[in-house]
Image (cartoon, coloured by chain):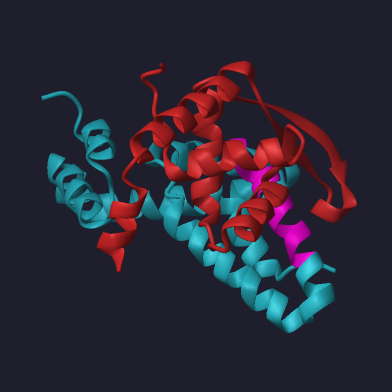
Amino acid sequence: MSRVSLGDVEHFVLLALVRLGGEGYGATILQEITGRTGREVARAAVYIAMRRLEAKGLLKSRLGEATAEQGGRPKRYFALTKPGARQLADSRRAFVRMWEDVEHLVQKAAR
Amino acid sequence: MTPPRLANWILSWWVPDSDRDETIGDLNEQFAKRATVDGRGRASRWYWRQTAHLVGRWRPRLGAVVAQDVRYALRLLRRSPGYALTVIVTLARRDVLRRSASPAENSDDSLGDVRSELRGAVLSRSDMAVIDGPR
């Protein structure tokens, strides 16, 4: 199991990319996270998380062509890497194990 | 549909070079979509809120700000050399006049003043370490 742990926003960014078919850019990633979680995620936090994930090698990016919809600016497309996918799977496994047999206790405590 | 110009300009100045195009581009794209659905007024308010948020959260490091200012100055010098040189000469002249009027300002105390002014501003410890140098 990897020793690198993912923060909430990092986790959301990686999962959003999987949902977007493996590649996406800032606007689509933000929309996917907000639409799925119903939470307004801080824009700066998402961009910072994307850069951090890229530095860790969990994401890679490429600059697209300038588009009119972006006001003549190029989009930066992000894609999940193999280590990124492995990290996601590891994180999920760790969470599932920690949740095992305690879900009802958490729900009881939250009531 | 173009986003509020002033907000766009603030972002262009504030967001680091490495992230500028995609950050502002994404924001512009979302603005255009919102303007179509909610109208320009609401979309503009949203754009300003996003700008304020980005400026609040994304504090560039002192070194990056200085480098950005130097690049801006060089761009200005290339585009309108006459104007840029007039500004440089005027500022230099004012500085020389001030120094000759008050020799004390030329001493190490002025560096101390700058340090305490910078300390009063919002700067991280690492930024202050750069200014103070090794101890």
- SS assignment for the magenta stretch, majority: helix
Viewer-nearest residue: B91 or B32: B32
Q: Is residue B76 visible?
A: no
Q: Where residue B63 appears, x then y in whole percent?
A: 41, 36
Residue name at image x 81 percent, y 76 percent: B37
**Is A92 situated above or below B54?**
above
Quadrant location of the C terminus of chain A in the rendered image: bottom left
Q: Quadrant of residue B61?
A: top left
The quadrant of the picture occupied by the N terminus of chain A is top left
- What is the quadrant of residue B29 in the picture? bottom right
Q: Is residue A10 visible?
A: yes
Q: Position of residue B21 (x, y in %)?
A: 70, 44
Q: Position of residue B101 (x, y in %)?
A: 24, 56
Q: Which residues are magenta?
A: B18-32
Q: Which lettered chain is shown in red?
A: A
Residue at position x 64%, y 43% from top?
A16
Q: Residue at x 49, y 45 (%)?
A: A9
Q: Is residue B91 left or right of residue A30?
A: left
